[in-house]
Image (cartoon, coloured by chain):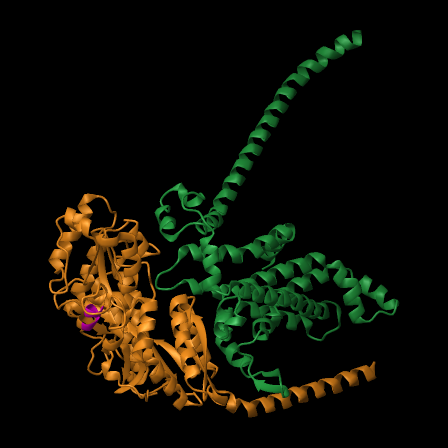
Amino acid sequence: MAISQVAIPEVAPASAPHVVLGQKTARKKRVVGIGGWILRIGLAVLFLFPILFMFVSSLKPDQQIFGDLSSIAAFLPIGNISMDNYAAVFDRVPAARFLVNSIGISAITVIAGILVNSLAAFALSRMRVRGKTVILTLIIATLIVPFETLALPLVWWVNQLPSFELTELGFMFSKGWIDTYQVQIIPFVANAFSIYLFHQYFESIPKELDEAARMDGAGWFRIYRQVVMPLSGPAIATVAILTFLPAWNSYLWPLMVVQTEELRPVMVGVQYFFQLNVSWGEVMAYSTLITLPVVALFIAFQRSFVNSIASSGVKG
Amino acid sequence: MRHAKKRLIVASLVATSLVATMAGCASGAAGGGSDGNNGELTVWTHNGGNVEELAAVQAIVDGYNESQDKTTVKLQAFPQASYNDSVIAAAASGKLPCIVDIDGPNVPNWAWAKYLTPLDLSVDLDENLPSTLGIWNGETYSVGYYDVALAMFARKSVLAENGIRQATIDQPWTQAEFGDALEKLKATGTWTNPLDIGTGDVGEWYPYAFSPLLQSFGGDLIERDEYQSAEGVLNGPEALEWAEWMQSLATDGYIATKSGADSALDFQNNVTAIQYGGSWAAANNAAALGDDLAVMPSVDLGEGTKIGGGSWQWGVTTGCADTEAAMDYLSYSLSPENIAAVAVATATIPATDAAAALVPGFEEGGNLAIFREFSAQSAVLRPETPAYPFIATEFTKATQDIINGGDPQDTLDAAVTAIDANIKSNGGYTQK
């Protein structure tokens, strides 16, 4: 009892300010936390506005889109709402065909890109190659040349390549890749940044694993396939995303090398709506349609997406 | 290991020789790769996404294919905004089709670059509106089904309420009258900028719409005798007057330095009181405003009302393997019925009187005949010189700078220097 009597006054004066301070800190933390959330939600809404505007406008007739511009109604699905613009999109543009083309082109570019770039990076990282530092430097150096500079020479170059065609007479050779699917894929498979990303990641995987595998009789390709690649999930995801986005958004190149409508990707389709009288509702409906696959992909691979942007931002 | 290396080297050599052989075969076949072989020829059009015009052109192609069995014509559509880039890229890679669509002012440049061959048609082109023919160095390289015109759109009720006279072809607004009208409209406070001249549209609109205003002041983009210099015409006293007037429209708050994305929709929504726009906006404006819509000629700034001339036209390329078939198709396509069908689909001005008689509204006294009169009386072709694309770019930059407050004389002088230097560096664009 005496102890408790002594103990209580000893503890009480010391703990009272501590509790008050703790409460204050907790309250402060809570306020900062709530403030942070409000700020984040505010920023999210701000960044969501263009997408919201695009979607809402896709449901309105042109005159209403412009009539609503000066008020909050521009972001609300109110007034004369319908799916007419979506129906009109399919009359104006072979949207389904363009979507299928883009999905195919992007998917093949991503898969081939992962294979080719990881193989190149593997060779530079694990195999004994004379002058590999110089080779890697040269590969990275190509990053400073913008694509726009290379576009015209590349058009000439791809037009010199041999092409195979299966006709009723059998296999035929012709010259030039212009107006094909492969011209939209092959030039973008090998990518300096992807090689660099893979190379840096492979460098972080212990080389002792290779030696152990070699002791077990594995060749280089088996080490690549069964040791290094299974450990490189994050690098593969990053490269996949960073290859997919430009492939999906590709505009200038297909504009230059694709002549047949059936071979065009989605981004070229946007131009179909810019006539002398522009139908803005249809522009918004088409934009919504071609944004959906990217949004779906983002939701599915959100974590990898953010990591890839962060890592490319730091390393690039 | 050594054997594996040998195998690799042998395999690489075989693969390399195979590719080289294929490339050799391919080179041999390339000569026959131009369009027009095997009784097939391709027509490229800028109508991708323009459902009505594309359908009308497709109907002409189908009609031609049914009318004979010697040649099959195939139509390939591109979106207008990127059409020129596609043609230039195709020309660079030797993949042009037999027949191309061309925006009128670009014809001399494409003819000079040897993309186009002079037309040899079985129809009489004398019947066509002059602005529907692409002529360079005395040769006709292209022909169009239609033309478009510039006009002033306003609400009759707004003009009446503010005591503003409705302009007519015989009596267009003078500069002073136009200034007075804008002052009155601005004073009402209803419109931030009462006039919309499409400053937000930076494509071909600037030279198409604003060079006629310059010409109405007495200036021009280039001297039109030899097409060798812009000195004195694009930076002379008349051009300076035009530049100062354009700048005053912005400084007085009559126009926005960058107008909205769609001038017609802004006008229909009463965001602006007067729209200076193309005849293609007439149908939508009429649908929105009905009888209240006033369609007026452009303002007379001293040297008479001027509007731009020359729209999309058709030409035959130099690489076409069957020029005769291409000319035959073009001749077929120029029948009054075909021209009328395209004009109906596009609400444009038919190229010939015979076709105009078949288009509702364009017959004499029709509600659209006013645009044909504008075109016939006031159209000025953009300079028929291969230098035009460069001139257009410089003029666009200069006009933007002037509207945004740049010194008029300095800006015009800089444009003239650039244009003259370009012409000189291209040997005067006389021949390539």
| Chain A painted colour | green
Q: Which of B377 and B96 is in front in this view?
A: B377
Q: How many labels does the image show?
A: 0
- Report whether B301 appears left or right of A117: left
Q: Is B211 drawn above or below residue A25 in the view shown?
A: below
> Which x, y percent locates residue A301?
64, 53
Q: Residue at x 50, y 54 (%)?
A: A288
Which residue is at a point 38% across and 72% down the rendered structure image? B56
Q: Residue B377, can we see it?
A: yes
Q: Main secondary structure of the magenta part?
A: helix
Where is B259 relative to A157, above or below? above
Q: Can residue B391 be seen in this view?
A: no
In magenta, the rendered stretch is B372-376
Point 77% across, 66% down: residue: A225
Quadrant assignment for the C terminus of chain B: bottom left
Up-down relation of residue A260 to residue A12 (above or below): below
Q: What quarter of the picture does the N terminus of chain B occupy? A: bottom right
Identify the colour of chain B in the image.
orange
Whole-percent x and y of residue B427?
A: 31, 85
Asked if residue B415 is among those painted magenta in the image, a careful observer would answer: no
- The structure residue drawn at horizontal position 34% and vertical position 76%, both measured from the top left corner, is B338
Provide residue B299's location: percent of width, then percent of height.
Answer: 16, 62
Task: Report x, y in % for residue B194.
Answer: 23, 51
Is residue B375 part of the magenta span, yes or no? Answer: yes
**Left or right of B308, for residue B65:** right
* B379 vs B292, nearest the viewer: B292
